[in-house]
Structure formats: C-alpha cells, structure tokens
Amino acid sequence: MTRLPTLFIDGIGFWSPALPGWAAARPALRGEPFEPAAARRPAPALLPPAERRRAPDTVALALEVAAEAVAASGHDPAELPSVFTSAYGDLGLLDNLCSTLAAQPTLVSPTKFHNSVHNAASGYWTIGTGCHASSGALSAYSRSFAAGLLEAATQCVADHTPVLLVAYDGPAVGALASAAASEGLLAAALLLAPKRGASSRWSLQLALQSPSPSTPALRSAAAHALARNAMADALPVCEVLARGSADDIALPLSAATGLQLAFTPLA
Amino acid sequence: MRALPAAIRPLAVRAYTATTAAGIGRDALLAALRDERSALRANDFGPTPLPTWIGRVEGLEDAPLPPALSGWDCRNHRLAWLGLDADGFLQAVSAARERHGAARIALVLGTSTSSIGETEAAYATLDADGRFAPEQRRPQVHTLHALGLFVAEALGLGGPCLTVSTACSSSAKVFASAERLLRLGLCDAALVGGVDTLCGNVLFGFNALQLVSPEPCRPFDAERNGISLGEGAGFALLERDDGGMAGLQLLGYGEASDAHHMSSPHPEGLGAERALDDALARAGLGPERIDYLNLHGTASAKNDEVEAALVQRRFPPALHASSTKGITGHTLGAAGIVEAAVCLLALEHGLKPGTVGAQTLDPACGPQIRLHTASGPVRVAASDSFGFGGNNGVLVFGRGGAVR
C-alpha cells in the first residue's frame, strides 16, 4: 500500500441548487433537517457582469465553489495551481453543438465551441484570478472526484504547494440524456495544503489500495438527493467533512485501485 | 521572484509509438520527417467537407476493433487500437504488467475529442422520440473518459486511470501527471499518450473561430493563414529509471497558464515562457543545452508570432527549432504525444526536422526556426504544446548518459 505524506484541507466549497454554499450544505449533509433553497445557478463574482449571465452553467458552478474554498483558506488565488475535474464538462453545450452539427454545421457558434473545451472552467478561473500557475482539467467518468483528488494531492506533495481542487457536473439534456446520466447541478472544491497553516481545518491521509472498494453508502437525505449527478463520487467526502468527526472512507478509482482517505479534524 | 521547481530524476521512456496521417508507427513518421514530406490532404472528411486541408489517418474505416472490444467501436478507439498495436508497444505494456502487476500500471491519456465524433453520428440517427437509437445507447462511449476506459479494458490495466483534457496541451501534461505518480511511488509504470480524431465539432468549431486555412498550413511562414486539423494517436511507457542511464528519458516538464483569453495566446507568451522555465528547471538544464525544439507552430497568426518571439529571446541562435504540423496537421489533444514522439525520434536518429509547409519564414522569426531537416547529434530535445484557455505545456527529453 502506498501512502502519501499527510496533507491539510484549508478551505471547502460546495454548491447545489438546494444547498448553495458550504454553510448551507454542512447541516444538511450531516443529516439535520434543512430548508432546501431553490437557487437556479450561481453568479460568481469573479466573472464580469455580462459573463456572469452568459457563461455556461458548469463554468459558473466551478468558479463559485473555487472562490468559496479559496476565500475560506486565505491563500492568494493568483499563486495556486489548480485541478478541475468533471465527468462530462458541459452537457448543455455538447447537446447544442451536436444538434447544430446534425442540422446546419456551418452555424456552429465560435463562442460555444471554445466554451465546450473541457478546460473552459479552468481557463475562466485562471483568467479571472490572473493566475499563471499550472491548471489541469480531468475526467475519470464516475470516478472523477477520486481522480481529481489524487491528481491534486500528488501535485500538492510533489511540488510542495497548496493546490485547489474543483469538481463539478451539470445535467444531461436533449438527445444525449439517452446515453449520459447526470441530473441537476453539483460542485465541490477543496484547498489542499502540504503543511498545516492558520486556516487548516482537517488533515488528510491518502493511500492507494487494491482491489478497488465498493462505493461508500451515503447517509444523509440531502446527499441522496444529489446522487444522480455525475459528480456524486464527491458526496461521501462532503458528508465526512460535514459531520466534522474523524473518519476513514475508501473511494473507487479505477478497475483495480481505490483511494483510502483518513480525515482528522484539527482543533 | 518566483521559486522555480527543483530538478527531478529522469524517467525512463521504455517504449513509444505514434500514428498519424504520415502512417502507422515510428518508421512512417521518421520517413516523413527525413523526406520533409507533408501528409496533409484536401479535406474529404464527413458529408459536407469544408474547404481546408487535413491530416487524416488512412484506413480507419476498414480497421474495426477486435470482436471482444466491438462494443467500444468508434473512430477514436479504432485509431487508439491502431496506434497501440504498432512498434511492439502492446508487448512492452504486457511485459510491464507482468513485471509490476496490473494495479501498479497507471494510465494517463490526453484527448480533446475523445469519441465525440460518435456522439455526432448518434445525433444524426435519432429515433422518433429524439433519443439515441438503441445501438448508440452506450454510456461508456459517449463520454470524455471513454478512451481511458477502453484502453484500460483492452490492455488489462488496473492502476490509477485518468483523462487529461486541456485542449492542445493535453497529451503533454500527461507526462507531468505520470512523473508525479511514479516519483511518489503510486505506480511502477505509466502508460501515457493521447488520441484525437477528426470530427464535425473540431472542423466546424475551428472554422467558426476563423482559425482554419483553406490551404496546407504554413507554420511560421510570412503568408501563413491558419491551421490544418489532424488526427493522431501516440503512446509512451514510462518507468522510474533504474540507474542504467542508457536509453531515452523524460528529463523535465513545465505547466503554466496565460491567464489572458480563452482562444488567443498571451501576447508576450507569459504562460508559455513560464512553462519553459519550469521544464528547464526540472531538467536541470539551461536553454543552451537544447539541441532540437519542436514548436507548437500551428500556423495561426497569433500562436506563431508569440512563439517566434519567445524562441528568439530565450534561445541561442544555434538552436534548431521547427514545427512539424505541416506534416501531421494539428492533432489537438494528441499533439503533445505526437510531437514528443518526434523529439524521441530526433534523439534516437540524430535528426532535426525542418518546418514542412513553410516557404518564406516570417521576418519575426529568429535564426533558430529552420525550414529544412538537418542531421547531427541530438542529446536533448524539447517540445512546446500551447492550448485554448491559455494552457501551456513544455517537455524536455534526453538520451541517457548524455546529460548527467
């Protein structure tokens, strides 16, 4: 079993239409009764006003939780390497592009095309924050959060630097919904750090294990309501962080490998 | 003053291969580089081809997947399979799996298209309810990570498996992810690479952005007027170097962001230069040690202008630099690995490719950017890959024993 050196979680972000923000999400993901909000989509301050409306839903999602995690951490976003992970990217854009191509291909919108790259959110984030550090965009299908967490953790250790992890997915729409399964909007972000700092709230020990474990069961009604989003593999970690107690969970990562995660809250 | 990354121990490149319009495998690519021969053709892809030139891989239509993998069928996976089955690469992977165990082989592949061409085909054959026809309801094909899922299953790999999708830097960044996994002991071998295929999204998308040339692309040419799109597959097998110090090596890598615009580069190449600095720092080398630099050189007005300026200000005049996209076209998510393969061929064969497609170099080019192929010892070769969203990757490769 290979274990990484202990890392720290300096900031957390979360957004769903019923739980817009970590403060709203925490009690709900702990299993406490909650009044679900009915937010449509985030309006991240990082985007200029016109872009706030026009940016794809997934970009708005990603930027919102990224900003929340960074603000909680007190780190300077312009210095942070980042890892963006999503199973599908923006399925609304994909449906629009494929429909246009099937009907009138020369009418493909240039803006929709450059917004459809998987690293669109990463691009908008680095542009908005003036960040020249490395930014990655990943997918691992239904294991995208686990893969993103592994990538962010390895960068954090390998380069001895805080790293921002941003995970998000949106709903499948149109014809693609018959082959892609994802409902609603869900995003989560973690600010990982290689050493304990003033804003560190958790320590995290990460190891690889084989064989791959089964998906941990969700415990809260709030998480169950989000389980059909393609980024659902983020929810077990979000529940641990919401509960606030030391806990070990294992996430499937690939055919024969899983992530063993040990979370310890810091006093 | 920003602290540069520390130097890394080189990784061994145990095997590599690339398949593009120039043909299947290393020998075909080497021949095209030596002969300065473009493999571009007038666009004949799809029902209503745009007037442009493309780098199309011959014969994919007649190269179905093996029966056991037929559920994965799509152009991107056919090209992946064709690419994997060249140069004894499958055997090299198999041997690594025997050596280390399936769970200790990581798989990190870059792609921008993945199998979106198959999704486009599904949209053209919707049923009466506007849903995919039954034979197209394949969730593991109609998703970005399809390539990774396919290769993991086809090769029986069980270690960490992820898709990197950062446009044109994708299959350069895979080397960086793999280096970290290997250095931290999270795997004992890593299969890296990438596959992108021609499709409507790419052809009509780049066309909508007015980045596509109606002629074969002319990287760094004074009269250049846009890119030629291509498809390609490439792979490399990396391991921690056991100290044998012979053979090909990954010496360094750099990743950085322009923080400027989604579809045009930073005018001063800020992110590109930072990626270069980090790659050289990890390699423990100065720019004067690079014998061959493979440029991103897409033949877009902006990329080539910015990249030419970067080369001029950071490298000595003796550097031999070129773009090879005039041979293969711009293979997008596969450009990183295809051009890494060009660097590895340069190291193995003492070959410094020229810039096919260019006739008269832009006056903004310094003495480094070369029209023609040259021969001579190549101990260190580097490659630039700069993508949409200002996502930049630079790789440095060497021949073992030649560097330290």
Image (cartoon, grey):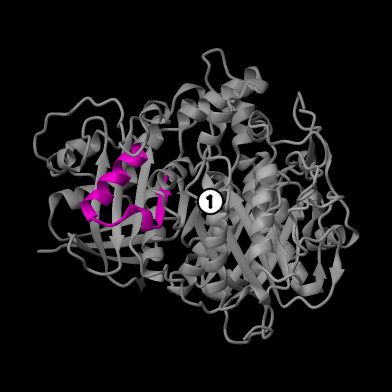
In the image, is residue A74 part of the stretch drawn in magenta? yes
Residue hosting label 1: B391
In the image, is residue B187 part of the stretch drawn in magenta? no
Residue sitting farthest toward the top: B128
Across and down, in percent, residue A5 comes to 31, 73
With A58 as the anchor, is B163 left or right in this view?
Answer: right
Q: Residues within 10 Å of mark 1 (few under 14, many from 20)?
A: many
Taking the spot 30% from the left edge, 32% from the top edge, the residue there is A42
Quarter holding the C terminus of chain B? bottom right
- Label 1 secondary element: strand
Q: Nearer the viewer, residue B228 or B67?
A: B228
Residue B207: quadrant of the picture: top right
With A256 as the anchor, is B202 left or right in this view?
Answer: right
Residue sitting farthest toward the right: B35
Taking the spot 69% from the left edge, 45% from the top edge, the residue there is B78
Q: Main secondary structure of the magenta part?
A: helix
Residue B68 visible in the shown view:
no
Q: Amino acid at mark 1?
A: Asn
Q: Nearer the viewer, residue A251 or B394?
A: B394
Across and down, in percent, residue B377 comes to 79, 78
Q: Chain of mark 1?
A: B
Residue B121: quadrant of the picture: top right
With B365 as the anchor, is B385 left or right in this view?
Answer: left
Query: In the picture shown, does residue B298 fall above or below B158?
Result: above
**What are the residue bounds of the magenta stretch?**
A61-85
